[in-house]
Image: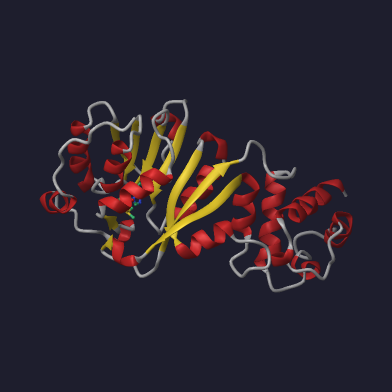
């Protein structure tokens, strides 16, 4: 149940008082529109029974929305030291509900800062490290119960892309092999301070109980790298450098050697990965 939100100063005042001018090097584009941050928090679903892990709270706009939406507890990791004092004020306004950690989300050990119970990631990610963070989390996709993440639209389109589209690639196959992926809504540049050059999209990822099709992960990733590394070539040629057995593996998987990577669904890639292990 959402609790009455405490009276808080406007975000613009927090930014001014703490000197939080946006730094491009840290991918800082802040969301100051409370309707929008509330919409993102709502899109994350019922947060009353879980911890929310937020990466990059910045001045705390989305953090406020998550707390007001009833998140049982928010653990927020922020790399920019300048934001920590501003976030401490927010933690004081919501006693016992917000923990702020100064650190780099790329290298932090999440198990050391989060309790082992249910946990969802909700974040307006810094664009320069968004994909790297997602790949880190996908090493153990079920560590979290779900992910509600803002990416550049171009990355979001890759995450949800279907075979045959120009956005379809390694990231699409890996993410959709492990998760149900949905693009929820777009957010225009003008919603951010300062406005980025590109449109953003909110994406929901829900880890599947098990990968969609059987395959050994390292093998699948290697096959994807080889196949999409030369995506315009026929698979026969694209996989040649990867393995001398590639034609035999394609045949065993029932895939035409003249097909191209972007035509293959997740199932076919998993068949191909298994075929390399079987021959
Ligand atoms: N959540 C805030 C909002 O919606 O207004 C800020 C979002 S801004 C796009 C990204 C935030 O991530 C910034 O506050 C930035 O300092 C922080 N950040 C950048 N790289 C980070 C990293 N490696 N680890 C943790 N935080 C990082």
- Measured as percent of width and height from the top left, residue 127 is found at 40, 58
Q: Is residue 140 visible?
A: no
Residue in the image at 26% along x and 42% along y: 64
Work out whether residue 169 or residue 39 is closer to the camera in this orientation and state it: 39
185 in relation to 40, above or below: below
- Measured as percent of width and height from the top left, residue 140 is found at 56, 38
Task: Name the residue at the bottom extreme.
Answer: 232
- Measured as percent of width and height from the top left, residue 107 is found at 43, 43
Residue in the image at 22% along x and 27% along y: 95
Q: Which quadrant of the rendered structure holds the N terminus?
A: top left
> How many marks can you see?
0
Residue 198 vs residue 194: left or right? right
Task: Name the residue at the left extreme.
Answer: 17
Name the colouring of the figure. secondary structure
Q: Is residue 88 visible?
A: yes
Residue 156 vs residue 10: left or right? right
Residue in the image at 41% along x and 30% along y: 114
Residue 201 vs residue 169: left or right? left
Residue in the image at 37% along x and 42% along y: 54
Figure quadrant of residue 119: top left
- Measured as percent of width and height from the top left, residue 186 is found at 42, 61
């Amino acid at each position: 149940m959402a609790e009455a939100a405490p009276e808080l100063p406007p975000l613009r005042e927090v930014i001014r008082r703490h000197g939080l001018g946006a730094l491009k090097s840290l991918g800082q584009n802040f969301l100051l529109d409370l309707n929008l941050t509330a919409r993102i928090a709502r899109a994350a679903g019922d947060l009353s029974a879980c911890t929310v892990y937020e990466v990059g709270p910045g001045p705390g706009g989305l953090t406020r929305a998550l707390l007001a939406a009833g998140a049982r507890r928010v653990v927020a990791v922020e790399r920019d030291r300048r934001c920590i004092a501003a976030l401490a004020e927010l933690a004081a306004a919501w006693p016992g509900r917000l923990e702020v950690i100064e650190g780099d989300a790329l290298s932090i050990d999440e198990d050391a800062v989060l309790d082992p119970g249910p946990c969802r990631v909700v974040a307006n990610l810094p664009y320069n490290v968004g994909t790297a963070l997602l790949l880190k989390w996908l090493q153990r996709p079920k560590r979290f119960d779900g992910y509600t993440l803002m990416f550049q639209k171009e990355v979001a389109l890759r995450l949800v892309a279907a075979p045959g589209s120009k956005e379809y690639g390694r990231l699409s196959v890996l993410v959709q092999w492990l998760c149900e992926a949905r693009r929820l809504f777009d957010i225009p540049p003008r919603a951010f301070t300062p406005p980025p050059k590109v449109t953003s999209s909110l994406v929901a990822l829900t880890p599947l109980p098990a990968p969609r099709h059987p395959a050994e992960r390292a093998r699948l990733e290697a096959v994807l790298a080889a196949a999409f590394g030369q995506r315009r070539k026929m698979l026969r040629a694209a996989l040649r450098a990867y393995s001398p057995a590639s034609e035999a593996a394609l045949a065993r998987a029932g895939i035409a050697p003249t097909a191209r990577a972007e035509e293959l669904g997740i199932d076919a890639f998993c068949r191909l990965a298994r075929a390399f292990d079987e021959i």
